[in-house]
Amino acid sequence: MGNKNQKKKKKEKPRQKSRSHATVYKGKLDITRSGIGFVLVENLLKDVLVRPQNFNTALHGDEVRVEITKDNPQGRSEGKIVEVIKRNQVTFMGHMEINNGFGFFVPDTDKPMPDIFVPQESLNGAKNKDRVVVKMVRWEKSDKRPVGEVVSILSDIEPNDLAMKEILLEHGFPLTFPDEVMEEAARLNDIIPADEIKRRKDCRPVLTFTIDPIDAKDFDDAISIQKLDNGNYEVGVHIADVSHYVIPETALDEEAYHRATSVYLPDRVLPMLPEEISNVLCSLRPHEDKLTFSCIFQMDDKGKVKQHWIGRTVIHSDHRFTYEDVQEIIEKGEGTYSDEVLLLNKISQRLRKKRFDKGAINFSSQEVRFKLDEHAKPVGIIIKESKEAHQLIEELMLLANRTVAEYVAKIKANDKPIPFPYRIHDNPDEEKLKPFVEFARKFGHKFNTDTPEKVAASFNEMLADLQGRPEQHVLEQLGIRTMAKAIYTAENIGHFGLGFEHYCHFTSPIRRYPDVMVHRILHQCLMDMPVIDKKMDAKCKHSSERERAAMEAERAANKYKQVEYLMNKIGEIYEGVVSGVASFGFWVETVEHKCEGLVSLTSLTTFDEFRHIEEDYCLVGRRSGRKFQMGDKVKIKVINANLDKRQLDYEWVM
């Protein structure tokens, strides 16, 4: 699959230490339950084994430098950690053990780590056996154990609340904001000065509204629409101007950068910015004047953009819609501002069709939502699908993001492109694509892999043909797995999945730090004062890592809720779909509530002896020929739900 824009994989280059000529790599430390560590180095065939005595203060998940002490070209090399570059986690949950005035914090973790010494002046009221949250404040190489301070005492806390907090801490997200951050947020003025309004395009007279989930409080974006005298329409995409309030090199900005993203769990949001900013000051609430950064498009009713304008604005939202409100208007053709909503929907559907016609890949998406009782326990699971109301907002946000990226991509400083946090999505990896193409061929789907464009077209042809067919689920899931992960980077190679040459994130600065960076750079460019940020690559990498951590936390929290829900359903039988296959069993996802659990091979031994055929993603019985393949519909019984491990066990029902 040829492509001149294909991103070249950068191999981790070993650093040479001149004194000993030892090879040093940079990687991430993974500590197993047994206590042995492995440093994962990108593009190194095997991880580097590190024994506990050589961790050198490093903890699970830390970014480290590892020096090779026993080189093994054929197998796994051994090493010792010589530097902790970046801590994955500095705040932990556990309990205090206090004896004779000496305090030691014992963390709740299945990853071996030393107790943390807490000096008496740092106990902050904690007593022996108290459950607490402790922050590690230092760990010198000369110290046997780290030193920490108690940041909160967990008294009378619900098990569910404890679990959600633990998940956040595990993934490196602090539960509270530092005092200086809260003080800075409290000092921000909620009154917009008249001279600030004069510097901006005044969009307050134009009909403007927001469309968000029913439980949302941080309204990042608003839409405006008005008909022009020339028969065209002016459609505005207005985004909260967070960068007006969050200034570089302040405690507020440093904390936002450190978090890099808000985290959305089933029963809470851990915001990137204090709630006074995210839910009040910057949130585009109805009937309030708000400062925004806008892309305003002049277009016809078919969604063809005639011209656009980008700049800072002030708006006044006339109405707050939920997605359900807008979907009802679309389906019934009547309701508040129905003419404008229906017109915007018509435009967005045209934009959507044009996007797919140009090569964007049309994977369907489903989202799990939980119905929770007053104690945040799940009493029901809802599967939410993307409807036209969601697509209305999605297409206009995509248009704004692409337009901003295209504008900045043209700007040069000293004849060089401006360092900018592009959102890129690499072409599918040929090694992952090859077995998928072979598997799809068995179902009659042919792929042309000559160019990325032809790969995208082949995917869309397959996805269209799959609708309603038995293999739809398996091929969609496997197709998604062939895809690269979207990341932030200053090296713009385009977005394969969306089919865009230039793309960035501009539309959610309340909850994503890269959007704040985009706003700042965009303002500099509009003022003809672009700045070369030499740290852009590092900032992009950090943002991508924190985004991945947030996704993992959200996935873990969802899994916890699913296990919690099925704890009361032990022995019940459900329809499911085989969602994964391994040599030790197969995973099944229930159709009703998308809860995935494992059917162990040992539970099938009374029926037959099964062998794993990797290339066909299936298990086959040696005597019966019975096959369990990804995508197969099966019946399962829930036999175990382990909350601590966030794990479900199923049994196949004949």
Image (tube, rainbow, N blue to C red):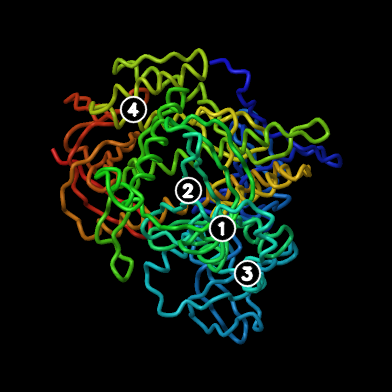
User: Which one is earlier in the sequence, the residue at label 1 or at label 4?
Assistant: 1
Q: CA distance from mark 1 to mark 2?
A: 35 Å
Residue extending farthest to the right is 19
Q: Is residue 434 left or right of residue 534?
A: left
Can I make out residue 53 in this image?
A: yes
Q: SS of the residue at dot 4? A: helix
Instruction: Tell me the residue that label 1 is attached to.
Output: 172
User: Which one is earlier in the sequence, the residue at label 1 or at label 2?
Assistant: 1
Task: Indicate the amino acid at tag 1.
Answer: Gly
Specify the label residue 185 is tagged with: 3
Crowding at mark 4 (Cα within 10 Å: few <14, some 14-19, many 20+)? many
Q: CA distance from mark 1 to mark 4?
A: 34 Å
Instruction: Tell me the residue that label 2 is attached to.
Output: 223
Q: SS of the residue at dot 3? A: helix
Crowding at mark 3 (Cα within 10 Å: few <14, some 14-19, many 20+)? many
Q: Are marks 4 and 2 in contact (CB under 8 Å)?
A: no
